[in-house]
Image: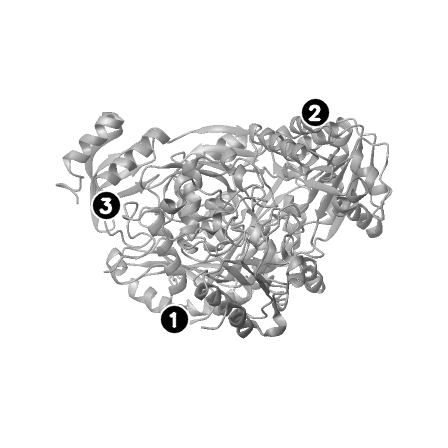
């Protein structure tokens, strides 16, 4: 039998197989830089058949494998367990078909999210899920994490925009799940693959559902004395039945750091918080909706409401919002970007609790979030080189998640569980709940070879829970 | 496995009564489903009671047939077993309705009509419109059936935020949550929705509501032929406020009827209705007109067959042409859905066989005689999908005690 590395080179070609330590270094983590692992090889297949060959090689040599998109994930989903083969899909980047009449595009997993929207725009269409990383993240990665973004409020997340997938299963078989026309009979297998964090196989083709570009767009900026007022304005809009395309809040610390950076958009530095409200749809409907936005903001003490005068100003607002995380580098060398969701009715109250937790731990905290979904993103800036600071950050993070759960929320809205929150799953789910999830994974990934250590905590009696499991999932978060 | 007259053995009835109380277990005149008639019902009154019932049934290896409102009792493949009904009738009631958030939680046995009414009183609407006036929350989700508002509401899975599900061994589990965005773990809500109760029994659900639209306009029109109807219908479905667009044809009537519902913020629906009125003569209608473009508008005659087909919207002309022997057709041109009813099962099956040979699309035989189900799978499944489904089923209900045979056809 050839060695693993020889088998991988046979599968994808020598130029698509990396195994020198200096080549593997960049693949030791994803956007969760705190959590690293050492792959034995990274392969860059171009076609489904190559992915199948790689998976079969991993089976023959009994090594785990980890699918990877652009590596922008924030929960450790693409972090390799030691000794794994990383299947990096960036060379599978063809848009295979665009059918504007059906509002469908078929893509390989390495297609960049923003690129898909750019390509279909001349047809009056766009791909709606728009994570902040969309200039880099890939559709395959979006499928793994069920990615969202600011416009999910109106349009939904990745799971609402995937009609069918081709999946290389952990046993090397290829399955085509779902239907380009929707309505595929049987269990909703596409629905469980989306958001499965690369643990049920490698997605090698995606049939996406596209949305029509709206006739008109209006982007407003509500200016508030504090973040709680901004949250309450959001609550008024939700109660009042308004469904904007996006509702995003940035707090004062975020405004300051963005305005000091290359992403400056002219946001008011003296505001306690700003609320970006984007309305889209028929031109005739926007005027009435805009009035309702104004009324909600004014009822919650907004000191002003600006309207983006043109596309340039609109893009500035969004550049400020989508690059805010990057701008945080001005505050400290490290950030911990949290992701949790609470009922929208509890938003104001929970934001206050989150801020008080950070104060108690003496950690600078910024808030940038999808207020319309109740999807919080508290960001803690810190320097891990300071003694004890990382430990305080982790403790504060745990308290923040618990506060969200106590308010009826959940521990992730779009970043996923990965390794980051794997051991927090028992805060949200009981043993039987987690067992029900394990059954799904056991059905498709019985030997645990596909992306082990992710999403589910190790049960106390691993071998009894799954007699086929090969023990890859006993590796703790570094 | 069954006792005399379509009941489980006495030992099972006694065990159920001992643990759940006499009120939860009753014997009655046989109620038929497929080729069997079941004369016993267990109706647990809580999640714990449901878990106890399923545990006992598992211990005694007694398969159960789950029943909600009884509206879609025949949907799916032919049952391959069943010793009693498991009714969700007592798992009934809206126990949380949050107008600040637009979410509701209700027991599986709650009629959708009750949820709609309560949500409506607070300015919200429930984005589920399966056929059947007695359809329950559990039935709507287990079948994932839908109506003409599929266009505006999306498929039923989109309304589900969280589920309480009791598995075949009696484990009471939860998935999802009560928030509108959630990627905490595998999306088991998607797995259970549309699974016909074969992976677990839905006990309770958190559902997402939509704001009740400020303006609603329903209009109807008659068009001469399918080509005109499809072109107009597709265009109408692409109007920003279109919530439902359907076409209906019946062999006893001339031409096609178009029904369109526009709903949303002022003045969108009025403008979109005017846009349509510029292209075809319209009459004003109301929500009751939508029933004529729902999938059960023309239930097949006894011995007949109804099939639901999905195709890309650009290929609907070809699909409709292939269904020309149907006695009735309903088309949702914005969603790519066609329901075709045939006077006889033989006619319908011949058409379905031709459909299966065409690439793309999907179909489900929603209604057909039980004798025809003996030889045919009502779901068009390829072997890879079927294989994965079998592996999943073995994990969740290895003894096939829940609605056996309903999803994955048993061998004849």
Q: In this view, does B23 lie to the left or right of A382?
A: left
Q: Tell me, yes or no, whether the two marked residues, 3 and 2, touch with CB atoms within 8 Å.
A: no
Q: Mark 1 points at which residue?
A: B354
Spatial distance from mark 1 to mark 2, Cα to Cα? 69 Å
Colouring mode (rainbow / by chain / secondary structure / one colour): one colour
What residue is drawn where x is 51% and y is 44%?
B185
- Which quadrant is the N terminus of chain A positioned in? bottom left
The front one of A468 and A116 is: A468
Q: In this view, does A79 lie to the left or right of A285?
A: left
> For numbered disc 1, what is the local secondary structure?
helix
Q: Name the residue under label 2.
A: A360
Q: Residue A193: x and y, percent?
A: 50, 54
Q: In this view, does A108 lie above or below B195?
A: below
> Share a chain, discs 3 and 1?
yes
Q: Name the residue under label 3.
A: B82
> For numbered disc 2, what is the local secondary structure?
helix
Of circles 3 and 1, the one toward us is 3
Indicate the quadrant where residue A46 lies. Answer: bottom right
Q: Mark 3: give few (<14), some (14-19) or many (20+) Cα within 10 Å.
A: many
- Which quadrant is the C terminus of chain A positioned in? top right
Q: In this view, does B3 lie to the left or right of B134?
A: left
Instruction: Please give the chain letter of the residue carrying mark 1.
Output: B
Q: Can residue B219 be seen in this view?
A: no
Q: In this view, does B100 lie above or below B139?
A: above
Spatial distance from mark 3 to mark 2, Cα to Cα? 60 Å
Q: Residue B29: x and y, percent?
A: 19, 37
> Share a chain, discs 3 and 2?
no
Q: Is residue B176 left or right of residue B346?
A: right
């Amino acid at each position: 039998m050839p060695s693993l590395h020889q088998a991988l080179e046979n599968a994808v070609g020598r130029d698509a197989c990396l195994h020198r330590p200096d080549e593997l270094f960049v693949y030791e983590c994803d956007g969760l830089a705190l959590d690293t692992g050492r792959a034995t090889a990274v392969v860059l297949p171009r076609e489904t058949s190559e992915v199948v060959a790689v998976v079969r090689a991993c089976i023959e040599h009994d090594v785990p494998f980890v699918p990877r998109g652009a590596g922008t994930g924030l929960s450790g989903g693409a972090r390799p367990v030691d000794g794994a083969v990383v299947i990096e899909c960036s060379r599978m980047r063809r848009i295979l078909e665009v059918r504007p009449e059906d509002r469908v595009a078929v893509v390989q997993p390495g297609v960049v999210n923003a690129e898909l929207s750019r390509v279909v725009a001349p047809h009056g269409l766009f791909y709606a899920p728009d994570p902040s990383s969309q200039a880099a993240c890939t559709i395959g990665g979006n499928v793994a994490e069920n990615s969202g973004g600011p416009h999910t409020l109106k349009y939904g997340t990745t799971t609402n925009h995937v009609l069918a997938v081709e999946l290389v299963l952990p046993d090397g078989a290829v399955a085509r799940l779902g239907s380009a026309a929707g309505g595929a009979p049987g269990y909703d297998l596409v629905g469980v693959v989306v958001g499965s964090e690369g643990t049920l196989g490698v997605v090698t083709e995606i049939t996406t559902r596209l949305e029509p570009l709206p006739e008109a767009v209006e982007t407003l900026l509500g200016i508030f004395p504090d973040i709680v007022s901004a949250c309450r304005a959001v609550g008024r809009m939700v109660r009042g039945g308004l469904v904007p395309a996006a509702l995003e809040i940035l707090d004062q610390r975020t405004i300051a750091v963005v305005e000091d950076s290359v992403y400056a958009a002219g946001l008011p530095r003296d505001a306690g918080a700003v609320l970006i409200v984007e309305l889209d749809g028929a031109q005739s409907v926007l005027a009435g909706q805009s009035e309702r936005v104004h009324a909600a903001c004014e009822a919650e003490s907004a000191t002003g409401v600006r309207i983006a005068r043109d596309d340039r100003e609109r893009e500035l607002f969004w550049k400020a919002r989508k690059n805010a995380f990057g701008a945080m580098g001005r505050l400290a060398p490290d950030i911990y970007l949290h992701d949790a969701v609470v009922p929208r009715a509890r938003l104001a109250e929970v934001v206050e609790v989150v801020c008080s937790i950070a104060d108690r731990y003496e950690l600078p905290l910024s808030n940038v979030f999808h207020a319309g979904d109740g999807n919080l993103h508290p960001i803690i800036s810190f320097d891990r080189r300071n003694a004890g600071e990382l430990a305080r950050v982790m403790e504060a993070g745990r308290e923040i998640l618990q506060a969200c759960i106590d308010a009826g929320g959940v521990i992730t809205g779009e970043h996923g569980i990965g390794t980051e929150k794997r051991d927090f799953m028992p805060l949200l789910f009981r043993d039987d709940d987690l067992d029900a999830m394990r059954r799904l994974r056991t059905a498709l990934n019985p030997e645990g070879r596909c992306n082990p250590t992710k999403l589910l905590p190790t049960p106390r009696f691993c071998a009894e829970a799954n007699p086929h499991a090969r023990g890859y999932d006993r590796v703790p978060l570094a | 496995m069954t006792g005399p007259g379509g009941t489980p053995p006495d030992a099972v009835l006694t065990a159920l009564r001992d643990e759940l109380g006499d009120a939860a277990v009753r014997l009655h005149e046989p109620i038929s489903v497929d080729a069997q008639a079941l004369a016993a019902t267990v109706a647990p009154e809580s999640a714990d009671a449901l878990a106890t019932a399923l545990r006992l049934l598992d211990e005694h290896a007694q398969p159960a047939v789950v029943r909600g409102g009884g509206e879609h009792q025949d949907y799916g493949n032919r049952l391959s077993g069943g010793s009693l009904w498991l009714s969700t009738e007592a798992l009934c009631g809206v126990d949380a309705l949050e107008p600040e958030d637009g979410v509701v939680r209700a027991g599986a046995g709650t009629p959708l009509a009750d949820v709609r009414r309560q949500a409506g009183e607070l300015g919200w609407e429930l984005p589920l419109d399966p056929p059947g006036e007695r359809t329950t929350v559990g039935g709507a989700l287990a079948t994932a059936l839908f109506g003409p508002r599929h266009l505006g509401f999306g498929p039923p899975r989109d309304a589900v935020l969280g589920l309480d599900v009791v598995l075949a061994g009696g484990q009471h589990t939860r998935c999802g949550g009560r928030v509108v965005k959630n990627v905490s773990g595998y999306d088991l809500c998607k797995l259970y929705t549309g699974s016909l109760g074969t992976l677990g029994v839905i006990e309770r659900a958190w559902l997402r509501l939509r704001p009740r639209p400020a303006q609603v306009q329903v209009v109807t029109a008659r068009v001469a032929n399918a080509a005109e109807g499809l072109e107009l219908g597709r265009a109408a479905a692409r109007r920003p406020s279109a919530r439902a667009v359907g076409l209906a044809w019946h062999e006893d009537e001339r031409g096609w009827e178009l029904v369109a519902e526009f709903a949303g913020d002022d003045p969108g629906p009025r403008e979109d209705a005017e846009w349509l009125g510029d292209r075809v003569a319209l009459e004003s209608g109301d929500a009751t007109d939508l029933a004529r473009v729902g999938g059960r508008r023309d239930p097949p005659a006894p011995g007949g067959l109804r099939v639901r087909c999905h195709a890309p919207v650009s290929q609907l002309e070809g699909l409709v042409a292939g269904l020309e022997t149907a006695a009735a057709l309903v088309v949702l041109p914005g969603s790519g859905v066609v329901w075709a009813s045939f006077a006889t099962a033989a006619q319908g099956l011949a058409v379905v066989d031709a459909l299966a040979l065409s690439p793309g699309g999907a179909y489900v035989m929603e209604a057909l005689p039980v004798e025809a189900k003996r030889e045919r799978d009502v779901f068009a499944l390829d072997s890879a999908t079927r294989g994965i489904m079998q592996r999943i089923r073995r994990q969740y209900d290895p003894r096939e005690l829940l609605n056996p045979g309903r999803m994955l056809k048993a061998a004849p």
